[in-house]
Image (cartoon, grey):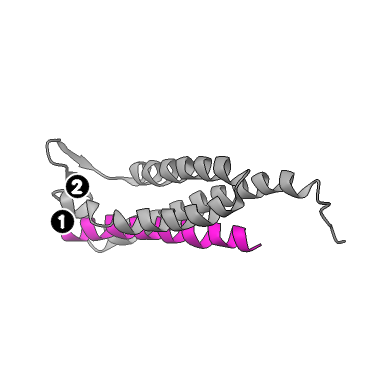
Amino acid sequence: MSHTLSPASAPAQAPTRLRSRVATVAGVSLVLNLLVWGLARLVGADFDVTRPGAGPMTVGPVMVAVMTVIPVALGGALTWFLGRTRPRAVTALAWVGLAIGLLTVPMPFTVEASATTQTALAAMHVVTGVVWWILLRRAVVR
């Protein structure tokens, strides 16, 4: 069975597709970041982190989930809001998300932590940025 969209229904479908795509970004990023976390634990990362001026903390799976899903949801809300009337904004924000992911790679190296912990946390920034870029770009192409 084939479905066609009439011009009147196509714009109404776009925000739903975009929300679905952002949810997919959050889910894929979460799974991959938890995989990075688990693999890093296997090779000795303790995920004990001390931020300047703050007490020590341990980054666990819940923290990984929160710090993955919340930024993606916020970026997704902005993308959905702007993308409703400006489809090109989705393309621009796909690139912005990639840039944020890559430009924040140094952040884990500003905290006191083992090298394996810092590297794993930095990898999570790259993972989320790249997943955001790939899946949002695919949303625009389709």
Q: CA distance from mark 1 to mark 2?
A: 8 Å
Vertical arrangement, residue 61 with respect to residue 135, above or below: above
Query: Dot 2: few (<14), some (14–19), or many (≥20) neighbours within 10 Å?
Result: some
| Badge 2 element | strand
Residue 24 seen in render: no
Residue 68 or 129: which is nearer the viewer? 129
Question: Going by the picture, which residue comes out furthest to the right?
Answer: 1
Question: Going by the picture, which residue comes out furthest to the top?
Answer: 54
Q: Position of residue 35 (x, y in %)?
A: 39, 58
Residue at image mark 2: 48
Residue 142 or 7: which is nearer the viewer? 7
- The residue at the point 33 percent across, 62 percent down is 39
Which disc, if any, is residue 96? none
In the image, 71: left or right of 13? left
Tell me the amino acid under the disc marked 2.
Answer: Asp
Residue at image mark 1: 114
Contact, mark 1 vs mark 2 (Cβ under 8 Å):
yes
Which label's residue is closer to the chain start, 1 or 2? 2
- The residue at the point 84 percent across, 52 percent down is 6
Can you tell which quarter of the image residue 32 is in? bottom left
Q: Which residues are magenta?
A: 115-142
Principal SS element in the magenta part? helix
| Badge 1 element | loop
